[in-house]
Image (spheres, coloured by chain):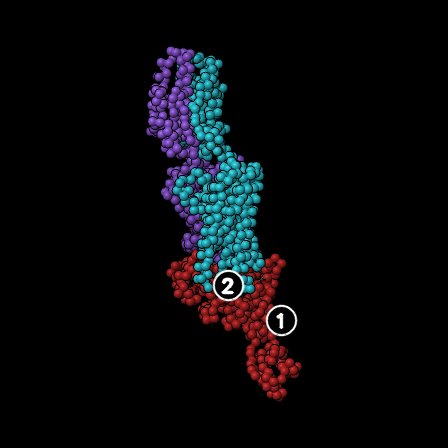
Amino acid sequence: MQVFKVIIKTIRKNFHVLSIYLIVFVGFMVLMSSVQSSGGSSMFSEVKRTVMIINHDSGNVIADEFADFMKRASIPIDPVETEEEMLDALFNEEADYILIIPEGFSADFLSGSYSNALEQQSIAGSRSAVWTDMKIRKYMDLLRLYTKLSDVDVNDSEAIRALTEKVEKQMNTETVVIYPVGVKKQGNEFTAMYFKFMGYSLMAVTILGIGFILKIFNGRDFRNRLRCSPEKTSNVNIQLVIGSLCFAAVAWLVLILIAITFSYFEGIKPWIWLTVVNSFVFMLSTLCMSVVLGLVVKGENARSAVANVVALGSSFLGGIFVPQEFQSEIVRKIAGFLPAFWFVKAIDEIQGLSSFTWNNIRPIMMYMLIQLIFGVAFICVAMAVSRERSRRTV
Amino acid sequence: MVVKVSNLVKRYGDLIALDHLDLEVRDGEIFGLLGPNGSGKTTAINCILSLLSIDKGDIEVFGEKMTPSSYHLKRDIGIVMQNVAVVEELNVLENIDFFCGLYVNDREERKKLVDEAIEFVGLTEFKKFYPKKLSGGLLRRLNIACGIAHKPKLIILDEPTVAVDPQSRNNILEGIVRLNQAGATVIYTSHYMEEVEQICSRICILDKGKMIAQGTKEELKGMIRIGEKITVEFLSGRPEDAVDWMGAMPHVASVECKENRLLIKTEVGKNGLEGILSELKKRDIQTGLIYCELPTLNDVFLEITGKELRDV
Amino acid sequence: MFWRIFRYRLISNIRDVGTLFWTLVFPLCLATFFGLVFPNITSSTITFETVNIGVYEAVDYPGDPYLIENLKAAKQSENVDLFHVTQYESIDEAEDALQNKEISGYAVITDQAVLHFSGSGFNQTIIKSFFDQYTQVRSAIVDIASENPGAISEVASLFEEEVEYTKSTFAGRDKPDSILIYFYSLIAMTCLYGGFQGQKEIMHIQANQSSLAARQNISPVPKLKLFGSSILSVTLVQYLSILILIAYLVFVLRINIGDRIGMILAAAFAGCCLGISFGALVGAVVKGGEGIKVAIIISFSMILSLMSGMMQASIKIAVEKAVPAFKYALPGNLIANTFYAIYYFNDNERFYFGMALMIGISIVLYAILTLILRRQRYASI
Ligand SMILES: Nc1ncnc2c1ncn2[C@@H]1O[C@H](COP(=O)(O)OP(=O)(O)OP(=O)(O)O)[C@@H](O)[C@H]1O
Ligand SMILES: [Mg+2]
């Protein structure tokens, strides 16, 4: 039990370093739960863009009807007051497009000057700009057609309203789309995000913690003293393994409890338990990786450096922070060599499950298996390294 | 008077680290500050240097009151601290130059001083080494070089020779004596009384923050009743039996028995060995080893505090 | 004296690989990760690319001869076509092309157009939009003709001229790009990691924190002089680290952070001072060992980087939305937003405000530090 006690003491002594990652984790949770997310859909649906519509010509039929149409056609964003806020909204992608209907727009339109009558702010040449421009053009072309070709009295708002209604009616004509009916992902993105982020904290904490433990037990003095002590080497090693496992498991448990607590506010879905299993598997492979790193890397500073680089690197490349679907092919290929990649892939898959049939679960099992294989590979490396070590030092 | 400390009191919370301490260090002497671990030597030095706030008392250096901003006084003080204080990222040469540079502005002069200091501690071969790569003893020597390179008038050394091997230690001690002969006043702190006895002209013994004795080593030894310490090994007869009659002899201050040996302390000024030998012969006691020692500072300490200096 | 201490502190700081790892190597590693991950992350800022579309015209139906012409003629901008049209001989061919992802969808044109897609995405939306519009205009013409047959002759002339209904009043200096949030946040983190350097320097000066400091306090060099030269050297090292990071972002990763180099240099310097002074204050004020102080600095910088969007840009946006003052009150966001202002705003008000705040805070922190450092005797060391 001696060894075990030393492990506990070591961890307690270095707790303040480990707690940093706990704080960051909780901080992330709190912040994320205040951020909005959007759900998926199951039919062919047009991609919609966020448009901020600022109507300075309200009270006039054309401007109002047009603004209404744009609101229905896009994801409308609440208008802001200042130029600065508009720029912020564009930069932060809260609004993809800002459409400003200037004062007197309706009157100008009717008098025939429509060219450059509207003001817009967007990212020139971007998809969103193309999309929104098309929507505007669609409406304006029709409206122009109607106003030009049917003589209406410019001052007769009733007649104008009749025109806009006609335009609206035409707008309902849609092209027929043939679209394969597929299984669509229905997910709880937040919970998935929590569990993914947990992977980051788990990596950081485990690599550091195992580093602390191995530092003590691999110090030559300590090793030699152990050799001279009545405890058997195999006994020591078993205690070491169990101790490390316990540490990693406790870290895992703490993090998983936090993640589940936060998910609770989102509503717990049955698949969450599969995610828990997945994260446990990931913990095992991380533990094995930590052992390798702990054996290879020397020095306090270097260890914490490596812990951070590996944890953050795996997280960025593996898709913990940034969804895998956004990554380029090459990055995804590279990331395949990281357990974190498969950990995230499994979560994505689990999140998209429509039912728990074997066929659906099989790929998830595969991903977990890959993580375990990584673990075994790490263990082999660790054993090779430590054998090499002990041959050299005694 | 180079340093004058009067009535100094320093507390760490409830612990009284220095208890009404009075010290006087005269110009040109090597002043030894001797005491067991935790007796307050380092604390006393830090107070003298104005690093620590004090609760009571006056401290004068070179006849002036010492304050943290007495830069003109600090310029003439060299310090070798108990904890090694060197810059990790600088090599031996740069370290010494850095510390010397805090005192000496002229580049040429500094170069000369640095070379001398390296010579002095014998680190010539290690000039380009970084502190991390130096052994404990070499590091200590670097620490010393950093402290004395600028040829200060007052040198304070706080246990400079810990972990230094005997030969280098002797070199350092000789060096200190040389510095002293060249005009520097030295305050030397140690719990090795042999060192202190060897080089110090005046000694102050501290215990639990109190000064228990101060003076030249002769004066100190004069303060106790012991003149000589005689050890007699008994080959026949039981030494226990001898304790009584031996104690009754004139000039014998105390008798103690350890296994088959008798430890006898005689009074100052009287040569007791002869009397003891003849008495032993008279009683027909066969003796083996007999030797006679002069009292050490340890005896002084033992006499005054009732405990050994060595094994505190 | 001042410059000699400065020189030696500079040498030490450059050789202190442990700290440089955090202030230089680590940010460079992160920048590399960002560079790998982010090139095509958000969909809305992606530049529009011509959509590949297939068309199959039913043989038995002559169709509208203009439809395909119109498809081909449609333009996104002067140089970019909206569609690249491929005509297929049979539906099967078109279906194959769709499955092979050669085209985003195909239209089967009989008396009406029917669109075939294999997924719903942006390109499909554009295709559908086009066809919707096409049918709607045609149906509108029919509608109008039924009421006012004479008007039909004008239709052609109406569509002769391409009308641009909107004009851009975008007032930003440069293209909005939310990816930059990540990189600004990275710069902010690097600035804040300067805290390690500040803390280290304080440890070398406060006699109760290290024996080296105690030793220097006994020398005839006034403490503030020691402090000044140390901080100056560490600021230089940290500033260089930040500049290396920025150079790496600009020249290696090809991130556009704006062309106002003077302002970028100034903001980097102000951020650098902010980070160092923050760390120095932690070093001077917080009781406890070096471990605790480093832990505090790491936690703070991590949380502040998180808030400034390092791991999720949406976090920054949400945080600033919830409490607008956080734009400037959180040091990480303050630094990030100053860089953002340089890149994005023609009006320099934000930039100057950010700069003034960063410098102001640094000055206040240094003033507090000076007061603390003036104390020269310690109750215990
Ligand atoms: N910073 C401190 N806070 C509290 N107590 C202290 C502090 N420094 C020293 N002490 C206590 O003050 C007493 C004197 O310590 P000091 O370091 O002066 O002893 P010393 O004579 O130099 O011993 P050594 O031979 O071990 O160097 C000791 O009891 C020590 O425990
Ligand atoms: Mg001491």
Q: CA distance from mark 1 to mark 2?
A: 42 Å
Q: Chain of mark 1?
A: B
Between residues B115 and A218, which one lies in front from this camera angle?
A218
Query: Type of residue at label 1?
Result: Gly
Residue C114's mark?
none
Between residues C239 and C81, which one lies in front from this camera angle?
C81
Query: Type of residue at label 2?
Result: Asn
Residue pointed to by mark 2: A224
Chain B palette colour:
red
**Is residue A132 visible to the viewer in this orientation of the structure?**
no
Residue pointed to by mark 1: B306
Between residues C69 and C262, which one lies in front from this camera angle?
C69
Q: Does C154 sit above or below residue B43?
A: above
Chain A palette colour:
cyan
Which chain is rendered purple in the image?
Answer: C
Residue depicted at x 60% and y 80% = B260
Local packing at callout 2 (Cα closer than 10 Å; few below 14, some 14-19, many 20+) is few
**Is residue B159 visible to the viewer in this orientation of the structure?**
yes
Q: Does C220 sit above or below residue A185?
A: below
Q: Chain of mark 2?
A: A
